[in-house]
Image (tube, rainbow, N blue to C red):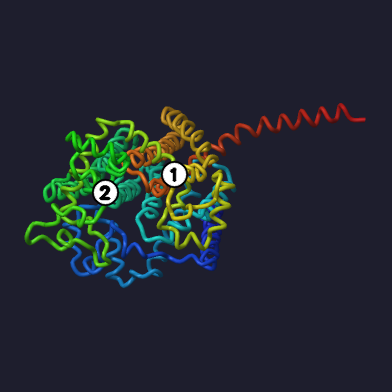
Amino acid sequence: MKPWRRNEFRVQLWLSLLFVASRLCFYASGVRFDTSSLQYGWQLLDLPLLQHDLVASLWYQHGQPPLFNLFVALMAKLGLATPSGFALVFAGLGLFLCLGIHSILRNLGVPRPTPSAAALVFCVNPSVILYENWLFYTYPIAVLLLLSTLFLHRVCKQGQRTDMAILLCLLSTCVLTRSLFHLVWLVLICALGTFLLSRNRRFWFLCGTCAVAVCASVYAKNALLFGVPSSSSWLGLSLARMTLQRVPPDELEELIARGTLSAQARIRPFSSLLEHPGHALAPPGSHIVLSARQTGSGSPNFNHWAYLNISRQYRQDSVALIRARPEIYLRSVGAAWEVFCTPPSGYTFLQPNRAHIKRYESLFSRFVLGARSGQAEPDGNVLTSEHIRSRFCYIWALLVALSLPWAVYRGFVGLRSKEGQSDRAHGIVLLFLAANALFIALIGNAFELGENQRFRMLAEPLLYCLVVTCLAACWRRAWPWLLRLRTCFSRGATVAGP
């Protein structure tokens, strides 16, 4: 083994040991893996259906992409659908996240020991701890995006076919797990790769075509069966939160009386079918995932056939309201950005574990992220504008606002560089990090209000790598000047001495 490889192996070994030690410390503080989403999670089908009728259940699911339900089903079939089984898998993802951040920062030229220290600091972030111990797709997608960045650098620098296949598998998994990552997102990445890569372009094009075809099959299935050419049918329900739910009651009645909105606009989005008596029936002979009004735990079944028409009507009403009163939608987008800039650890469903590290989370939010208040949520669990602003991460927002333009500039400089393949790979990776972070923020905050800090967790590792790389580059530029200033002051002190 070459010396530099041996040193890198030692660093990764120490990182792994420290990662395990940190998880044992948080376990000792009371943090446990939370599988309550198996009962209340809207995105998950009933576990008995996944265990005993998997293929048909996934085939008739229209509310979500299929892979997260498939993952839970496989865990159940292996007898690992327990808190300890899921905890082991998610801890493994956390280790990949830690080592991935270290590798990406090293690849981007951040000098030692900064990559190791930065990886450890990120992995003891309270948000990382809380999402790592919660059964939901947010944490796996965040890790997959980071690993995609790592393999993108390998593809750009070495152009090996194996790395290309792994990269496209990671990207396809994101599309088939989280509806935010639309098929168009994957198509754009594949198209840009065809033009930007210098090696094995034909192989990249063929593999990219296969990846797009696999993801497009889910879109085609939903279009043929449900008339929804997407991986999720809930767009109208989400958009109604940002529009119809934000209209004052008297003004809403006036718009309904004028015929601008339908009577359904009075009903809160994501309400049970009891609130929609005219839509409660499914076609005869429908599968249980389409006909059951409630899940096994008693929660509304938002995969019911009726929600297809309900979501379409909400979408039509939301578009009509945006045309009639665009300022309402724009205020909602502004509120979504405010929530997005609060710590991801403040998400409501993380409360059971957050209670065990409340003091630590509060101190981290105030002194690392720059929030004015460390309190995760006010009394009564009702978020107010003042509370959101008190949790706004001012320091982190400033660092991100400075790092993103720098990353875009350095990315295009790297693309135009003729000094070697390494600079070009650095440029592509920086642009990939910045573009995906912006994509998550812009699209997520344009169509959702209320869970935006959870969306931010998807982009958190990407933004962190950008911020650390930018700060390291600024330090390299500033260090010679600092040495000159110190030399000048030393000389001045010598001359002024006795």
Element on which disc 2 rests: loop
Quadrant, the C terminus: top right
Residue under label 2, please give it.
269
Q: Nearer the viewer, mark 2 or mark 1?
A: 2
Determine whether, in the image, residue 99 is placed left or right of residue 113. Answer: left
Residue at 40% across / 54% down in the picture? 139
Q: What residue is drawn where x is 35% and y is 45%?
A: 160
Query: Residue 91 sits in which quadrant?
Result: bottom left
Cα distance in 3D space between marks 2 and 1: 32 Å
Q: Foreground: 177 or 236?
A: 236
**Residue sitting farthest toward the left:** 284
* Picture residue at 35% right of the left edge, 33% below the top: 330
Number of on-image labels: 2
**Residue 369 appears in the picture as rendered:** yes
Vertical placement of residue 413 versus 185, above or below? above
Per the rendering, the mark at residue 462 is 1
Q: What's the residue type where badge 1 is placed?
A: Leu
Label 2 crowd (10 A; few <14 / some 14-19 / many >=20) = some
